[in-house]
Image (cartoon, rainbow, N blue to C red):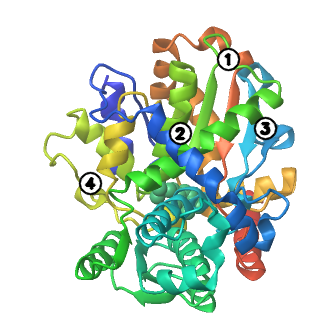
Amino acid sequence: MPSIEAATIDDLRHARPAFWAGRTAACQSSLQIEPAQVQQAVDRLARFAPLLQRLFPELQASAGRIESPLLAAPQMQQVLGLPQSMGQLWVKADHSLPVAGSVKARGGVHEVLEYAEQVALEHGLLADGDYTQLASDAARAVFAQYQVAVGSTGNLGLSIGVMASALGFKAVVHMSADAKEWKKQRLRNRGVQVVEHEGDYAQAVAAGRALAEQDPRCHFVDDEHSLSLLLGYAASAANLVAQIADAGRVVDAKNPLFVYIPCGVGGAPGGVALGLQQVFGPHVHCFFAEPVQSPCFMVEMLAGSGALPELGAHPSVYELGLNNLTEADGLAVPAASELAANVVRGFLGGVYTVEDDTLLRHLCRLHDSEGLRIEPSAAAGFSGPQALLQSAAGQDYLQRQDLMAYMAAATHIVWTTGGLFVPDEEYAKFLARGRELLA
Ligand SMILES: *Cc1c(COP(=O)(O)O)cnc(C)c1O
């Protein structure tokens, strides 16, 4: 009988849904991030809240906080066939995040604000500590001399572009050929320069990075290496912890928390997992979800634990014979962020993959059961609970972690990472395809 890991690799290579579980002796983090670093991001977002409230009418009600609710999802739980004896299903509704319409509002906004703060301090714009000053004409004239650039499949570009242009920066977004047309249009409408690149996401990032390096007044948001992005995502834990308590859910050794997060390069799920790990320690189990053709983080984890010896230390999905083609444009990434991988390797619960058709089914199910409107990328989390409970690798993980006796008390949080700005006609097409698949 092949080992569990050999079976996982076989599924991976054949683009079948695969499950890899971590927390073995081979899984060690090589980079430690301190809670104080995450707290700095939390504090920065709080300092800027009054300014954001002024810049974005949609942030009036939240006093400048970019936040999403934690929602009970009992109907979706039933539709997914997850029995109560295995815990309760919840949705962290980042698909509704204002300003950027996706989880990128967390990391992307944080990094632009960190850069703006640095420029403002250099120019003496924050002498009295009043951040709303940064909306003044004088401050905007300073920001206009600087540029913020990014390479993106779409959503990161939306977040960076909208935030940077709102502050008065020049904003440039380098996009891959597979980026959706409506995302490019939305950026252009905001005065953001969109540069289109042939090839995939990694190539768009590389081209943008090379151009930005020639200009000292250009800040390049580097999705593959940015600590600022990661910390912005990690800052989400502070509010989520309060939401979990408000929901009456307990997290400890006898009340495990499972979190399922769609994964592209790994920065968003990596940051979220980091933030939660710092609060809940081993009692939170984060699982990253990837398309079957773009499982870059699973590949990175396997390679890092020596399970793919024929490939290098940091292989792309192409090297496994996969094509990185998926409807989940936010997740169409061929190689993982080594930064995110080095941070989470030691505590990550695991990574699993999902077929595109399944994403569309989940999108439709969530619409019909809970009335929530998400994009295909954001649906990957919903395969998590069943994949964990039904795969050999998932069952092995639950046994190794001594969790089987406590599943009835488990909380399962599915992170829905995007959707707010999907145009109605695009969404209607996704819905129709999902409905056809479910019929
Ligand atoms: C970007 C994105 C993700 C994943 O984030 P990474 O930092 O690339 O791993 C997940 N869902 C959506 C909708 C996204 O846009």
In primary-sequence order, the first of circles 3 and 4 is: 3
| Amino acid at pointer 1 | Met
Q: Position of residue 354 (x, y in %)?
A: 53, 50
For marks 1 and 4, give the one nearer the viewer.
Answer: 1
> SS for tag 3?
helix
**Amino acid under disc 4:** Leu
Residue 398 higher or lower than 109, as above or below: above
Q: Nearer the viewer, residue 408 or 92?
A: 92
Callout 1 touching callout 2 (CB < 8 Å) = no
**Which quadrant would the C terminus be assigned to in this image?**
bottom right
Please say if the residues under marks 2 and 4 sit with CB atoms less than 8 Å apart. Answer: no
Rendered position, 245 above or below 363: above
Mark 1, residue position: 407
Q: CA distance from mark 2 to mark 3?
A: 34 Å
Q: Which mark is residue 320?
A: 4
Residue ID for mark 3: 77
Q: Secondary structure at mark 4?
A: helix
Q: Indicate the quadrant containing the N terminus: top left, top right, bottom left or bottom right.
A: top left
Report which quarter residue 29 is drawn in: top left
Q: Residue 39 — which label?
A: 2
Is residue 249 placed above or below 437 in the rendered structure? above
